[in-house]
Image (cartoon, rainbow, N blue to C red):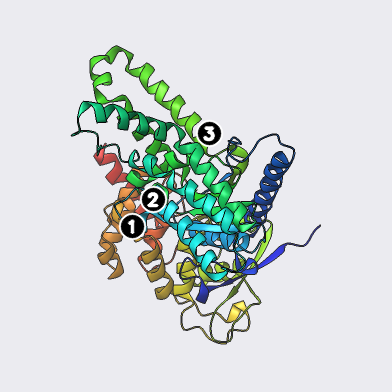
Amino acid sequence: MTDKTKITIDLASSIGDEAQDVGQLIQNNAFNVITEQVIDEIKNAKKRRDEKTYDGVHDSRRMVFFIDSTRGAGKSTFLKSVTKKLATYPNLQLLIELDPTKVETGEHVFVSLLYALNKLIEKQRNERYSSFKEDKYEAWRKQFKKLAGGLQLLDEKNSPLQEIDEEAFLDWGLERVKSGIEFGSEFKALIQYSCELFDKDAFVISIDDADTNFTKGTRILEIIRRYLDSSYLVTLITGDLQLYSHLVRDFYYTDLGENIFQHDRHRNEEQIKLIDHLETQYLKKLFPLHLRTHLTPLWDLIKDTEYLVKFGKNGNTDLKLEEIIDQLLKKGLHIKDERDLSLYKEFLLKRSLRSIIQLLQFCTKHMEYVKQVDDMTFTHERVAKGFRAAFRASLHSHQVDVNALSAGDINALNEAVFRVVLEDGEFDTGCYLRPQPRKNITTELFRSVGGRSCKPLRWSSRLRYRLHIARLG
């Protein structure tokens, strides 16, 4: 049996989304896989060019690496760590780290890409003026200017051809058509010139959170489809595939237009199936299955990796994550039965990584000089408060009075438990207040946030619930 990989989680440095060292990166296995994949794809692309199978302009195989997970799974930290690692390879050059949600300019996202490329080239020229290849730079500059006509076409709403005479319209219009047709190949030629200037095999483009901005997110996907299919470009993009799915469906639905559905109602089912097919094939084309990386929950990761937790001024590094979670649940929620403990631990470790880390940060605050897990003092009040904070949004979504629970109102607790038991339909087992798989919000939370033991309710309480359910019919 092989030893598990050991990863240290430093709670003090797990606050932001900054890149982390490999020894502290929770998704370590996925990190190793994606970095190896990138290098392999670059080698294959270089081999195709060396064998004259394709040149850099006509090789349309995308090197788009999609990092998939839900919100709060650590995508941003993972992406920055991968980008930082790739930037250390001598044959790669980081072009841009782009977060569409933080771009304030109203310009097309593609303009930000060209701005970063131009800035990078000019910086290198100024720093290495004596050894810079001026002949190649002039060729690059000439190629860069060729994109000017095509850039005007990115904004389809504003056309400079609207208010000019017919003769000028014909000449200028033909020039614009030429610019539009050749824009993609001209851009790929520009990237090839840029790589030759830097003596690099490829540029790296990092895109984060494109799925959370539907307007710019659609533009990002279309840029990838139209222009980033070059063997000189490595694109790393994060997101939730489910969100991208909705984004693409909305794109095609808008493209088809509501009139089609209104005027041809007897074919609505057929039209929906066509949109389903378009959505599936579009995402497979942009994000090839073999280049996708899925960030899994901690519950799955602990099977192959041993996680140690570092916290406090003394920097404890010998405390195991699973043992800390056990102590938190035992002392904080008064759980004694091992089967119940396993159930609660599975529920907690399947939550988003952000929720788990922040809960640990909250519950271990002010803990200093802890030498072993048994010495950790998880008070019931502190753990209950942490759970309330971690799951507050879920509690609110189920119309639970969180403030009343915080104040220890038993009536609010009973009402909340009863309502969720009704929603779950678990009339026989719901009153035992254990995690249920049907809902994200679970009945045991009400017991924990109420500041009481997680033992089953008394028979009188169960009978009262059953009578109330029967009365409601």
Q: Which of the marked residues, 2 or 3, is nearer the chain's N terminus?
A: 2
Amino acid residing under circle 3? Lys
Amino acid residing under circle 2? Val
Task: Quadrant for the N terminus, please.
Answer: bottom right
* Residue named by callout 1: 393
Question: Cα distance, mark 2 to mark 1?
Answer: 38 Å
Q: Which of the marked residues, 1 or 3, is nearer the chain's N terminus?
A: 3
Q: What crowding class fits label 1: few (fewer than 14 Cα within 10 Å), some (14-19), or many (20 or more)?
A: some
Q: Which of the marked residues, 2 or 1, is nearer the chain's N terminus?
A: 2
- Spot occupied by residue 179 in the image (x, y as percentages of width and height): 40, 35
Q: Nearer the viewer, mark 1 or mark 3?
A: 3
Q: Considering the numbered disc 3 on the image, is that residue within a helix, a strand or a loop?
A: helix
Q: Nearer the viewer, mark 2 or mark 3?
A: 2
The residue located at (43%, 71%) in the rendering is 383
Q: Nearer the viewer, residue 464 or 232?
A: 232
The residue located at (19%, 30%) in the rendering is 165
Q: What crowding class fits label 2: few (fewer than 14 Cα within 10 Å), some (14-19), or many (20 or more)?
A: few
Amino acid residing under circle 1? Ala
The reply, left or right, for residue 323 in relation to residue 423 is right
* Residue named by callout 3: 285
Question: Cα distance, mark 1 to mark 3?
Answer: 36 Å
Q: Nearer the viewer, residue 455 or 315?
A: 315
- Spot occupied by residue 58 in the image (x, y as percentages of width and height): 59, 35
Task: Quadrant for the C terminus, please.
Answer: top left
Vertical placement of 228 versus 392: above or below?
above
Is residue 203 visible from the viewing direction of this image? no
The residue located at (27%, 46%) in the rendering is 468
* Residue named by callout 2: 111
- Spot occupied by residue 116 in the image (x, y as percentages of width and height): 45, 57
